[in-house]
């Protein structure tokens, strides 16, 4: 019930963003600037704030457990991404787009705000462990997958992998396990800045729906089938398997949210930059985001989380 309420709240924020775009108050330029604030201020503040909540530190073995689970999850998704496009009969030129959409979920814009509301700061520390494989893979495998239709090739760049999300995760871990005390005014500042993440990120997502006729999103049968596999089948099956070996409900909940969130907005950005099918990627982001309002509570209910 809590997840359903949170998803409805996020949906209303998306609707407000859509209405703002509809009346011209939130255009593409404003959306890009707001996205920059979320990525470079809101999300890092939310992650660092989780590290400041260190009065009752979690056991180190739990952190290593989550790191191991994140690596296993991404390894399985990489393997599935080889076969799923073929099973769905995806055209060869769109194969890379479907691979990227399957592997990378919106763990920053949607996952973190949800976990913060559902479980509190400790869950964000676990979620931060997913940023490391996410960033390494999206700037290596993700780019190469999108470049299948292009002659452009980009060399691996560490500066893209070591971005603000990864750096803030390292900072949070250091503060947390070194038990570094923070003045109250620093905690207040960081916590206040973290609170911009959910409303601003959802408004930007809502504003992006202006690029489509919503009705068109539900006419692509292949994309619909893919969305149901990504949003229902994989998170239910994956989290159920994890629950057979992991007894901590918060860790299981974090894994569920990381698996059940919609396609990462980075999928559309990479497609646009590296000559992938941008229209397909953007529709995938939009469709899975809309459907996730319903599918995430369903997944949680089925799994009893």
Image (spheres, helix red, strand yellow):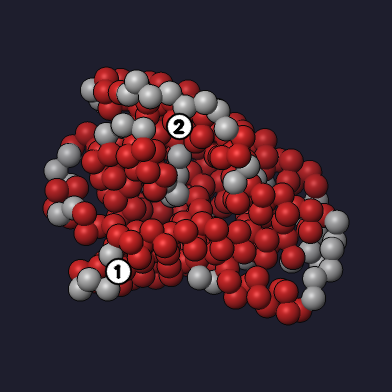
Task: State the image coordinates of residue 139 (x, y, percent, origin top left).
Answer: 51, 34
> Secondary structure under badge 1?
loop
Residue at image coords 60%, 59%:
44
Residue 92 visible to an observer of this rendering: yes
Please state the horizontal and vertical placement of residue 58, each as a whole percent of the image: 78, 55
Which residue was labeled with disc 1? Answer: 26
- Residue at 41%, 54% (x, y): give it: 296
| Mark 2 nearby-residue class (10 Å; few <14, some 14–19, many ≥20) | many
Crowd around label 1: few <14 · some 14–19 · many ≥20 (10 Å): many
Who's the residue at 62% across and 64% down the image?
45
Q: Is residue 80 visible?
A: no
User: Which quadrant is the N terminus positioned in?
Assistant: bottom left
In the image, 259 versus 134, the foreground residue is 134
Relative vertical location of residue 81 with respect to residue 46 in this rendering, above or below: above
- Left or right, 194 with reference to 5: right
Work out whether mark 2 precedes mark 1 in sequence or the reverse, and give the earlier one.
1
């Amino acid at each position: 019930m809590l997840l359903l309420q949170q998803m409805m709240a996020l949906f209303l924020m998306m609707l407000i963003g859509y209405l703002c775009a509809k009346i011209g108050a939130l255009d593409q330029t404003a959306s890009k600037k707001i996205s920059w604030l979320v990525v470079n201020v809101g999300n890092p503040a939310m992650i660092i704030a989780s590290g400041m909540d260190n009065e009752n530190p979690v056991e180190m073995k739990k952190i290593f457990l989550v790191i191991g689970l994140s690596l296993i999850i991404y390894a399985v998704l990489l393997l599935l991404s080889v076969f799923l496009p073929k099973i769905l009969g995806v055209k060869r030129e769109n194969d890379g787009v479907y691979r990227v959409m399957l592997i990378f979920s919106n763990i920053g814009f949607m996952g973190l705000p949800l976990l913060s509301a559902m479980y509190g700061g400790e869950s964000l520390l676990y979620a931060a462990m997913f940023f490391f494989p996410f960033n390494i893979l999206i700037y290596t495998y993700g780019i190469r997958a999108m470049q299948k239709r292009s002659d452009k090739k980009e060399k691996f760049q560490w500066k893209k992998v070591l971005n603000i999300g990864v750096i803030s995760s390292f900072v949070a871990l250091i503060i947390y396990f070194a038990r570094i005390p923070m003045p109250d005014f620093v905690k207040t500042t960081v916590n206040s800045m973290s609170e911009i993440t959910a409303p601003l990120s959802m408004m930007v997502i809502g504003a992006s729906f202006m690029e489509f006729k919503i009705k068109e999103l539900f006419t692509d049968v292949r994309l619909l089938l893919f969305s149901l596999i990504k949003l229902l089948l994989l998170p239910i099956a994956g989290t159920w398997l994890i629950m057979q070996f992991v007894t901590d409900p918060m860790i299981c909940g974090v894994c569920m949210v990381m698996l059940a969130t919609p396609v990462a907005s980075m999928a559309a950005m990479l497609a646009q930059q590296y000559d992938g099918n941008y229209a397909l990627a953007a529709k995938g982001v939009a469709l899975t985001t809309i459907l996730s309002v319903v599918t995430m509570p369903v997944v949680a209910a089925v799994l009893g989380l």
